Amino acid sequence: MPLDDTPLACFVSTIETGEWQRVGYARLTGGIVFELDDGEAVMTRWRAQVEMLKRAASAAA
């Protein structure tokens, strides 16, 4: 899906199937943790990508 002034490839998609995984001996309670080498630069890029994705979602709606 084209999005002006966006350096990312954007796609419109639909999830057709999903999978739930569960084990009796453990459960995820805290999510995923990232350790970033250059946290400020990464967070700046991630924020920009989220904004681009929001614009793409609005354009697709």
Image (cartoon, rainbow, N blue to C red):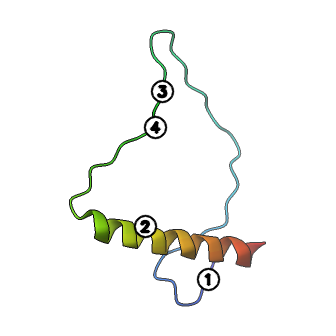
- Marks 1/3 in contact by CB < 8 Å: the verdict is no
* Quadrant (top left, top right, bottom left, bottom right) of the C terminus: bottom right
Residue placed under numbered mark 3 in the picture: 28
Query: Regarding mark 2 in the picture, which secondary structure is present there?
Result: helix
Say left or right for 39 vs 52: left
**Residue type, label 3:** Leu
Q: Is residue 55 left or right of residue 33?
A: right
Mark before the other along the chain sequence, 2 or 1: 1
Q: Which mark is residue 2?
A: 1
Among the 4 quarters of the image, the one containing residue 22:
top right
Disc 1, SS:
loop
Marks 2 and 1 sit apart, C-alpha to C-alpha, by 20 Å
On the image, numbered disc 2 is attached to which residue? Answer: 46
At 51% across and 84% down in the image, what residue appears?
6
Contact, CB < 8 Å: mark 3 with mark 4? Answer: yes
Q: CA distance from mark 4 to mark 2?
A: 18 Å
